[in-house]
Amino acid sequence: VDECTGVMNPLKSETEFKLYPNPNTGEFFIETFKEFGINIYNSIGQLILQQNLSDGKNQINLNEHANGIYFIEINQSDETKRVKLIKE
């Protein structure tokens, strides 16, 4: 079982990222050490945001979306990791 909160979420390779705060009120940050793409899905599986992240601190804004549970899918090369995000 993966924790839905937490600061450090390593992928199986050398790619690591920090996602915070979680839970949040719509604005959160993903800090990366490499470039990769993310997809954000709502609780019923609809893609609501697709974005490429750069090395460093990236701000994501979900203020226009309803409170609830979202899933962030992080893609790099042939690896995919899914993290639960809570918007309060």
Image (cartoon, rainbow, N blue to C red):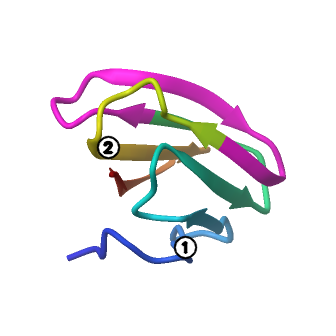
Instruction: Write the start and end of the magenta stretch as one range.
Output: 40-59
**Which label number is shown at residue 70?**
2
Which residue is at the front of the view, 29 or 33? 29
Question: From what the image shows, is residue 8 above or below residue 44?
Answer: below
Check disc 1 and report its element: helix, strand or loop: loop
Kind of residue at disc 1: Pro
The answer to whether residue 82 is left or right of residue 14 is left
Residue in front for this viewpoint, 3 or 60: 60
Look at the picture and state if 67 lies above or below 10: above
How far separated are the C-alphas under marks 1 and 2? 19 Å
Q: Position of residue 54 (x, y in %)?
A: 81, 43
- Measured as percent of width and height from the top left, residue 9 is found at 51, 72
- Name the residue beneath numbered marker 1: 10
Could you say which quadrant of the image residue 22 lies in? bottom left
Residue at position x 45%, y 50% from top?
25
Q: Quadrant of the image for the N terminus?
A: bottom left
